[in-house]
Amino acid sequence: MYERTETEYFTAKRKAANRLCRGNVKPSDLPSNSEIRDQIQLFARLHEGERRTANLKDMRLAALGMMRLLRVFRPRLIGSVMTGHVRKGSDIDLHVFTDSAGLVTDLLENEGYQYELERKAITKHQESRIFTHIHVFDRFNFELTVYADDQAHYVFKSSITGKAIERASIRELEELLHAEYPGLDLEAHLESQTVDVDPLMLFRMLLLPLENVHQSGKYHPEGDVLYHLLQVFELARDCRPYDEEFLLAALLHDIGKGIDPGDHVGSALSTLEGLITERTQFLIAHHMDALAYKAGTLGIRMRRQLEASEHFEDLMLLRELDTQGRERGAIVGTVDEALTYLRELERENEG
């Protein structure tokens, strides 16, 4: 559950019991949801250290900014950011109240946020209900759960403790922030955050349309550009899971095909200028030169230039993965999963 390969307590307990025990297991023999949560938090404190505390503060500030934006929908902060039980990969959970989810998405769209609307059927106690979630992609991801306007004062219960969930209004969150972080200039911090540009969200905007950019079947039998890039990213993560710059090059090297197919390298470099490091830039700039290098058709001057670079071995590895990432039916993750991985890696490297 810490790695989020499983998110439901019941399912996680059942799988663990099947692996560790023989025969039937009584529910009373299994740990409670709160006991599991406490162990996950202990694991997070051990592995994430002070970075976890800093992330919690930043996530609460991000939550306040979003809640102020959505104040007309009476937002309430719930979940791990409210209680302090955040861990690697946690998002920010908000309840919003309106009879029209479209009003929320219209506001998000006008503010330039990227989001996805999900309607999910949940069956509990033989009763099926449809829940509406809006997933907002930003520096920290948000999950907004939309409830009817008349449920704003309803007491929701926690699946972990069975008690009323802890939640905070805008005013209550502001009070919490002042109490938890004395001396914090709340307004100045929020104002500084609004001008930051999140490169990963820009990458997302560039990547998603590539699903509709198809390639020559002779050289790319796998299909569209996005599928190819996700394959190369998966291969890169297998061999360099720690290398943020290399992984970015793997994910973005053909991004220019959605901008200017006639010069996909040049258009990619122009679009990504200022958003990537010199090393990532070098790998993208020369990934086609590496193809000519392997084919023996690269001019002697460029050949020597590449060989003299400290990134030459990395470039040739990217070239190899670029060639491998062209399989039909290969299993890949989504763009958001790739970006979430990069986000966590970025935070680890900063720590």
Image: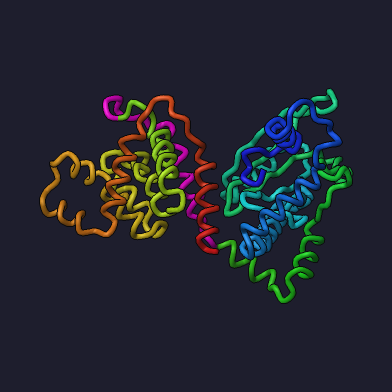
Q: Provide residue 257's location: percent of width, then percent of height.
A: 34, 39
Q: Residue at x 81, y 28 (%)?
A: 124
What residue is at 16 percent from the left and 53 percent from the top?
Answer: 302
Residue 203 lies left or right of residue 53; in this view the side is: left
Relative to the observer, which residue lies in front, 112 or 239?
239
Q: Quadrant of the N terminus?
A: top right
Span shown in magenta: 196-219
- Specify the quadrant of the image occupied by residue 68: bottom right
- Inspect the magenta stretch and tell me whether residue 203 lies in it: yes
Residue 347 horizontal side relative to residue 279, left or right: right
Q: Determine if the magenta segment contains residue 71.
A: no
Q: For residue 215, which quarter of the picture?
A: top left
| Furthest residue in direction bottom, as rendered | 183
Query: Which residue occupies the foreground of this view, 135 or 17?
Result: 17
Locate residue 198, reporting x and y percent.
51, 55
Residue closest to the far left: 300
* In this view, 235 is above or below 66: above
Residue 316 is situated, as x and y percent measured from the top left of the image, at 27, 47
Residue 312 percent across, percent down from the top left: 26, 53
**Quick check: 239 left or right of 18?**
left
Visible residue check, residue 251: no
- For the point 34% across and 58% down, the residue is 279
The residue located at (33%, 26%) in the rendering is: 221
Q: Quadrant of residue 222?
A: top left
Q: What scheme was used to colour the molecule?
A: rainbow
Front-most of 107 and 138? Answer: 138
